[in-house]
Image (cartoon, rainbow, N blue to C red):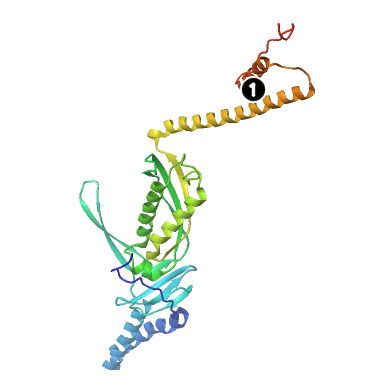
Amino acid sequence: MNTGLRPASKEVEVSVQSGWLMLVPVLSAYPIGVGLIITAGNGGGVASGIIGGVVLLFGIICSGGFFTLQPNESRVLVLFGDYKGTVRKEGFHWGNPFYSGGVTKTTTSTDEKGHQVTLQSKRNPRMKVSLRARNLNGERLKVNDKNGNPIEIAAVVVWRVQDTAQAMFDVDDYEDYVSVQAESAVRHLGSQYAYDHGEAHEVTLRSGTEEVTAALQAELQERLSRAGVVVEEARLTHLAYSPEIAQTMLRRQQADAVLAARQKIVQGAVGMVEMALAELAKRGVVELDPERKAAMVSNLMVVLCGESDAKPVINTGTLYG
């Protein structure tokens, strides 16, 4: 699948200097450098001024090496285009001040007057990457299911960055990459299964919740592994027929429910009639010829299967009158 593509990057965890150890010498460089420059100006010699300038420049440059990391946060260290490693330990740190300070993304948009406007937004400041779990609440998508019926489907995805090197170097913008691939996976999932009324033992979107969820998570993980992202959970949050066929499908569901209920009622009624005839014959209450037995079965079936209460007509005469 990845034939001809650049090999996947691999994260290397490294450590840097404690920021507290470097704080004192860096801060001390400012008054020392300024003092030497002032001394040179008061006749202390050119050498004093040069040393003071170097010390002051050292303080200014080294001040850019301080950074902090919160729990579940990391920083990718890039020196002149060369990946040096990733710091994952939280706290106050100091690293080479020439490590890359961030990535600038240029975007173009259209204003209200129709003019093209170029925007620059800085993302991943100081190459920091959050390792926390994130939610992606997808929008409702309109797709055709396996049977060609238009449906609306949406999903929520819980994900986090596992490999910071892949996230930063193997895709252009890993957050946009996750969003686009999640939408593509949900669309593909919706087209692989029928909404409902599948064939015997067929998994559908409505009935096979666990199977569909597992399939969605597996496909998302396969798509997002290139960006160093781990999918912790993926579930459908919305599933319905599209409005243009919703009423028709609702009537179909109601008809199926009525047929299933009728079938259950008929099965129960036949069992009750059979039991009644067997008990009458067993106890010798009455002897019925085939014609009277058929009439009794007919009457019992009407009473048991009818939707309204039966209003029996009582025969006070002979059974055969």
User: Residue at label 1?
Assistant: 304
**Among all residues in the image, which is located at the extreme front?**
289
State which quadrant residue 96 falls in: bottom left
- The spot of residue 173 in percent (x, y) is 34, 62
State which quadrant residue 164 falls in: bottom left
- The spot of residue 156 in percent (x, y) is 45, 52
Residue 157 appears in the picture as rendered: no
State which quadrant residue 279 falls in: top right
Q: In this view, does 221 lie above or below 249?
A: below
**Among all residues in the image, which is located at the extreme left?**
115
- Residue at the spot x=49%, y=51% of the render? 211
Residue placed most toward the observer, 24 or 62:
62
Number of numbered discs overlaid on the protein picture: 1
- The spot of residue 27 in percent (x, y) is 41, 81
- The spot of residue 315 in percent (x, y) is 71, 8
Instruction: Look at the image and tell me in which quarter the C terminus lies.
Output: top right
Residue placed most toward the observer, 154 or 48:
154
Instruction: Look at the image and tell me in which quarter the N terminus lies.
Output: bottom left
- Residue at the spot x=40%, y=42% of the render? 152
Q: What residue type is labelled 1?
A: Leu
Residue placed most toward the observer, 183 or 149:
149
Look at the numbered disc 1 and give the secondary structure of its residue: helix
Residue 170 appears in the picture as rendered: yes
Question: How many residues crowd around disc 1 within 10 Å: few (fewer than 14), some, or many (20 or more)?
Answer: some
- Residue at the spot x=53%, y=29% of the render? 259
Q: Is residue 272 above or below residue 143?
A: above
Residue placed most toward the observer, 34 or 146:
146
